[in-house]
Image (spheres, helix red, strand yellow):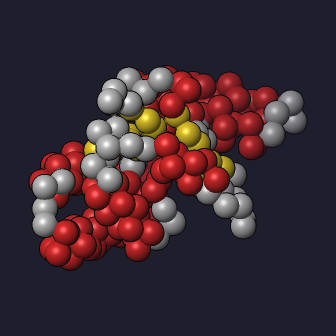
Amino acid sequence: MKMRIYGYGRISTRNQSLKKQVEALRNYGVKEENIFTDVIIGNTRENSLEKLFEELKRGDILVVRRLDKLGSDMDIVKKRIIFLIKRKVTLKVLENQVFQKYLENLENEDSVYLEKKLEGALEILLLLKEKKNEETRELLNESNPKEKLKVDKKSLEKFKNLYEKYLEKRIRKKDILEKLEINKNGFNLYESYIK
């Protein structure tokens, strides 16, 4: 049986874009026809992910940019990872190499301990993510964010050009967010640099 490589991407707010996720999957080598995506805003169900999980066979590879793309909470993520391991599908998490190594060690784990070990690893990841989010919030709450967060000149120039059009009411704020793939906080940060 031939091994197939699949990719999955998901967004859950209007301010997010699938572009970077899909680009990362393509760069890994996932063919366009094997990339499944979901836009989950409000009460929308995860139809593509369910279809993808039906497609996956022993020996296949599933690539995600980040682990949180597999579900909205850690219990769902854990169940999906266990499903993949038991089905002998390799999961590749592109943006967390430490967790990736841990996953590779779990692939041959006795199923009795699999869930507990995975649960421990996911709790550590969740704590690290919360710490990172807290540090980011602290930086954004500083009185002068320019001192802490640096913006490269090329991106700032793009923002300036788009911002001028925004002030002239030729484009919407939403258009800037999409083109630069930033959220409202990013918009405010860029804006603080040019004022």
What is the x, y in percent for residue 104? 17, 49
Q: Nearer the viewer, residue 108 or 166?
A: 108
Image side of residue 30 versus residue 170, left or right: left
What is the x, y in percent for residue 148? 36, 51
Image side of residue 109 versus residue 85, left or right: left
Looking at the rendered structure, the number of numbered marks drawn on it comes to 0
Question: In the rendered image of this protein, does residue 70 appear above or below residue 133?
Answer: above
- Residue at (74% x, 43% y) in the render: 174
What is the x, y in percent for residue 159? 62, 31
Quadrant of the rendering where the C terminus is positioned: top right
- In the image, farthest residue toward the front: 1
What is the x, y in percent for residue 14? 69, 52
Quadrant of the rendering where the N terminus is positioned: top left
Can residue 28 be seen?
Answer: no
Q: Quadrant of residue 97?
A: top left
- In the image, farthest residue toward the right: 169
